[in-house]
Amino acid sequence: MSTPSKPRQWGVTAPISTASPTPHELQLTETLVEALKGYNLFESDQEARKREVVLGKLNTLTKEFVYQVSKKKGFPESLAREAGGKIFTYGSYRLGVHNAGSDIDCLSVLPRHVEREEFFTTMYEMLKEQKEVTEMTAVSDAYVPVIKMHFSGIPIDFVCARLSLARIPDDLELSDNNLLKNLDERCIRSLNGSRVTDDILRLVPNIPAFRIALRCVKLWAKKRAIYSNVMGFFGGVAWAMLVARICQLYPNACAGAIVSRFFRIMYQWNWPQPVLLKHMEDGPLPVRVWNPKLYPADKSHRMPIITPAYPSMCATHNVTDSTRTIMISEFKRAAECVDKIFIGAGQWPELFENHTFFQTYKYYLQVIASSDSAESQLKWSGMVESRLRQLVLKLELVDMLVLAHPYIKPLDRVHYCSTDQEALDAAYGVFNPQTTFALTEGNMDVNHMDLLRENGDSAEGSDPQQEPRKVYTTTFFIGLFIEPKTAGTTGTRKLNISWPCAEFTKLVKAWDKYDEATMGITIKYIKSSMLPADVVEGDPKKLKRPQSKNKTGNPPAVNVEKPNKKMRSGTEEQADNTGMTNPVATGNSEESIATAPPAAEPVST
Ligand code: ATP
Ligand code: MG
């Protein structure tokens, strides 16, 4: 007697259902694909070819780089050529879910006689000579050291790994754990991206369905402003692993059904139970594998999603209490929305409706990093961005602050300033819209002087022969949700956020490349009505003066009202040693803001 064969298990548990799609689910998948096309998610054949050409050039450059280093080290011609070198793509491009604006994550694999430092010197110089390369920065001291650049306008994250092999042949694969033996930790981390992406593809039962579902989830997460690893939400790889897990649980389902199960299951997930795509492996290295029983740091992960490739790690260690709350409420909203779509009471675009971050909160923190050149701004604002989560974590400890909600997209601007005062103002978020331009990735180096001359704005109040000074600013926003007053509460409540702000300022200024003469950091507490018009309206081109100068001509660093003696009598409002307080007092009728000395120094003049 034959027993029915057990369905193949794709993940760490048996599937929930192996049912095939119903006609209704197939039809909803079709309408989903149509809806996704409307968001310009799929690149054209021409764009796809351009990416292939760029990758071909990077592969050739890698081989040429290995050859040159080999020759320099005295290798004979034939051995220098045979040393090889190869690139691997990983991330969303490798998964097949990238869109027109996506970056390409690319790994350059090098033989053992090429030092990884040489990638950041010799290879960097070789790339610099390419006319197609713009906006290049090397971050060799990052957790995963990377050269970031645009190649023919395509953003590339270029990392490298040096293997213990004499040659890197074209047919090399990276799945063998033994390849990791005797490698530098940075090389292991750099290899990890590629090994994780390949594992995800191996662990998903139906790749076409996975791709459509993941495109849908990524679009939704971006529209709802919860797509950002650095800000404490999930990044690309975490979303990919979550969708992959649902695909494992429904191995025969079509994309529409996967999306619907995805939101429901994620809303109900019993966090901090981890999401795993396979059982974690032991391996040949003396390195940590994620283990909350052994490591207290791992135990603190609020929504752990674990990478499948050895050595497994948590891709979501950045999640804070606030970002977890926000994501779970978004899962709920999405689950309800998709339920409606499934019963014919809604349409897919409703799932992708824009977030309402700038309409949600009554108070916001505005953090501005400023400097005097595009190059240093890229590094400085990147550094501030990478630490912003520390500010959120500290804000979460403040009494009465229920939620500190970081906004995922910082706003980059350049201000053409004709006076020192203007430069100072810009660093505090007070600027002239006529001489200010929004910057987007890929146009950081643009010079707007011709445009200014055309408009006749550049010479206003200044020597027409002298070029105005440029001040670069990057503005981050954190929405603050203050505990509502309970019925019957009387009197004034005070919210003191001076400690988190002071600590954060101290933290970013402790950066070894921080230059007091050219870089600035300010934190300003603003009411929603004072938000810059361009963020509220969602159009960075519509730059309006966000708030006027006060009567003295000095920028209100901590907005907005005159210090209120009554409010300032509280002990929490003592200025700390940076001379900064950012208190808000919530009065009987309406919350109001008490001002204090400037939050931090602006860009130096
Ligand atoms: P996107 O479309 O946003 O570029 P992506 O999947 O390419 O999405 P990236 O943020 O570009 O994601 O990261 C590229 C790769 O780097 C990921 O696929 C992953 O392998 C690795 N990576 C990035 N962030 C993490 C993380 N927090 N933990 C582990 N690996 C990560
Ligand atoms: Mg990517």
Image (cartoon, rainbow, N blue to C red):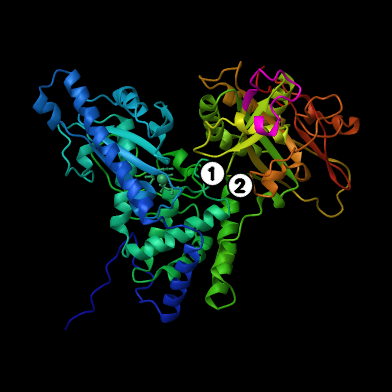
Q: Is mark 1 within 8 Å of ligand 1?
A: no
Say above or below: 385 vs 323. above
- The answer to whether residue 340 is magenta is no
Residue 322 image label: 2
176 or 84: nearer the eye?
Answer: 84
Secondary structure under the numbered disc 1 in the rendered image: loop
Rendered residue at 25%/33% (across/down): 62
| Mark 1: amino acid | Gly
Res 308 seen here: no
Gap between marks 1 and 2, in whole Å?
Answer: 9 Å
Say above or below: 191 vs 166. below
Q: Earlier in the sequence, mark 1 or mark 2?
A: 1
Is the residue marked by circle 1 packed among few (<14), some (14-19), or many (20+) residues within 10 Å? Answer: many
Residue 299, image x, y percentages:
47, 44
Q: Are marks 1 and 2 in contact (CB under 8 Å)?
A: yes
Res 589 seen here: yes
Is the residue marked by circle 2 packed among few (<14), some (14-19), or many (20+) residues within 10 Å? Answer: many
Residue 498, image x, y percentages:
72, 30
Left or right: 456 in relation to 151:
right
Rendered residue at 29%/37% (across/down): 58
Which corner quadrant holds the N terminus? bottom left
Secondary structure under the numbered disc 2 in the rendered image: helix
Residue 601, image x, y percentages:
68, 22
| Mark 2: amino acid | Ser
Rendered residue at 48%/55% (across/down): 218
